[in-house]
Image (cartoon, grey):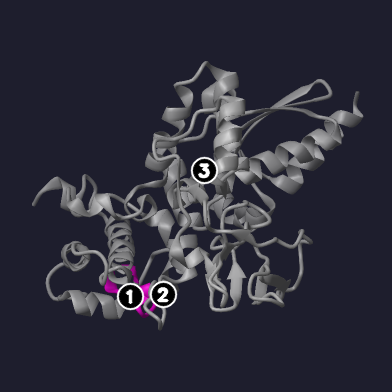
Amino acid sequence: MTQWLAGIRDDPAERAHRVVAAALRAAYAWTVRHRRSGAMREVARMTGVVMEAHGPGRGPTTPLDLVGCLRRRLGLLPALAEGTDEEIAQVVLLGNDDRLTSDAHDLACEYALPVGGPSDSAQWMPTWTRMHTDQIRSMTFNALIQGNGQESYVASRRFLIEHPAGSLAELRDLVSETGVRLPPRGYTDIPAGHVHHSAGGDAWWWPCPTCRWPMEVAGTTVRCQYRPHAAVYQLTEGRSGGSRPLLSRIDEGRPRVAKPVARPAAGSRCVDPGVWRFVVVPGASEIRLKQCLERLGATVQLWPELDRYDLHVRAGGEEFRVDLKEYRSVHRLIADLRAKPPSARVLLPKTHEHQLGTLQTVLPSLLITTETKFCTEVRRALRTV
């Protein structure tokens, strides 16, 4: 059996990982089968990966069997039935409308993995469905590092995080003014599922209040595909055919955020969905934490030593080094921390502080803190001056 199929390790956790990765790719391919000639071939290839992971007589045996499984909870697949991430076991990848569910973008993408060997699907399949988190981040950061050292790297990375979408003309002007570097693909078209077409024929998109990337539009509901960015909105058409559609918030309303304003989709671009999910999303938390600590009176450096860790903090006479980890799946976080131990203390942002107990139990020797605890520690250090 070839190594690209079975992998170097073949324990139950690795097989479960391959099943989720293959299911994610098959689900995406199914959604584009009417416009991509190789889509059904990709579904068939991923069926083979799932069959291999399960072994003879277990799991789906045809592409349509696999598609049927994608419309149900992943935990019903034998490889994921026991001993796997409970959150991922509850995920359904295909909705009733045969569109990818929000869980596919929000949670299952953390299981993306190169499976099935080389194929032409890489030409049309999004990076977040076929590449591991570290691959996407490395591909992006390596392009940024090719600038003029630390200062250029920080400026380029921060630009990408603070400007993940916008008018192409404005983005070009900003890039020209700042001289920042962009990742290989730069900015691409806004995905169709993130654009609203008004009755008058105009197309619109809305930036997420937290990460500024285009929110998903599902009927009249508008929200960020990353669930911790919690605001959910109801869409209503403008009073006249050419006026902007409006949003009204329909969730619990916390935290308070400014209401997004519709922006014309014509001439607008955004970063690749994989770059958004694995660079922009955590980067937004890193910059937010930096600003919070600076308001307390600390001095904060972003991504020192070309991203050896995330934040170097000076408060009073003390110095702190932290590496922010923002994973939806605590199981994937644990696996990645074991594979690549961090260079600084792990910090969980407020939206992920509930993972602390699990991490401390499974990885007792690892230095871990939460955003709340760390801010308290910094305040205490500042008071000693």
Question: In the rendered structure, are the residues bearing label 2 and label 1 in contact, judged by CB atoms less than 8 Å apart?
Answer: yes
Q: CA distance from mark 3 to mark 1?
A: 27 Å
What separation in Å lies between label 3 and label 2 (alpha carbons)? Answer: 25 Å
Q: Earlier in the sequence, mark 3 or mark 2?
A: 2
- Magenta portion: prevailing SS class: helix
Instruction: Reply yes or no: does residue 75 show up in magenta.
Output: yes
Name the spot of residue 161 as percent of width and height, x first.
59, 41
Residue 384 percent location from the top left of the image: 90, 27
Residue type at mark 2? Val
Q: Quick check: can you spot residue 362?
A: no
Residue 24 vs 169, above or below: the answer is below
Q: Is residue 227 left or right of residue 9?
A: right
- When the figure is inspected, residue 197 is found, relative to residue 143, above or below; the finding is below
Residue type, numbered disc 3 = Val
Residue 185 visible? The answer is yes
In the figure, residue 255 lies in which quadrant? Answer: bottom right
The residue at which mark 3 appears reads as: 279
The segment highlighted magenta reads 70-80
* First reached walking from the N terminus: tag 2 or tag 1: 1
Q: Nearer the viewer, mark 3 or mark 2?
A: 3
Locate the C terminus by quadrant.
top right
Reply yes or no: does residue 138 show up in magenta.
no
The residue at the point 69 percent across, 53 percent down is 350
Q: Considering depth in this image, is 324 or 212 the residue closer to the camera?
A: 212
- Please tell me whether residue 128 is drawn above or below residue 223 in the rendered image: above
Q: Kindly identify which numbered label has been placed on residue 326.
A: none
What residue is pinned by disc 1? 70
Mark 1 residue type:
Leu
Residue under circle 2? 92
Residue plotted at (57% across, 53% down):
213
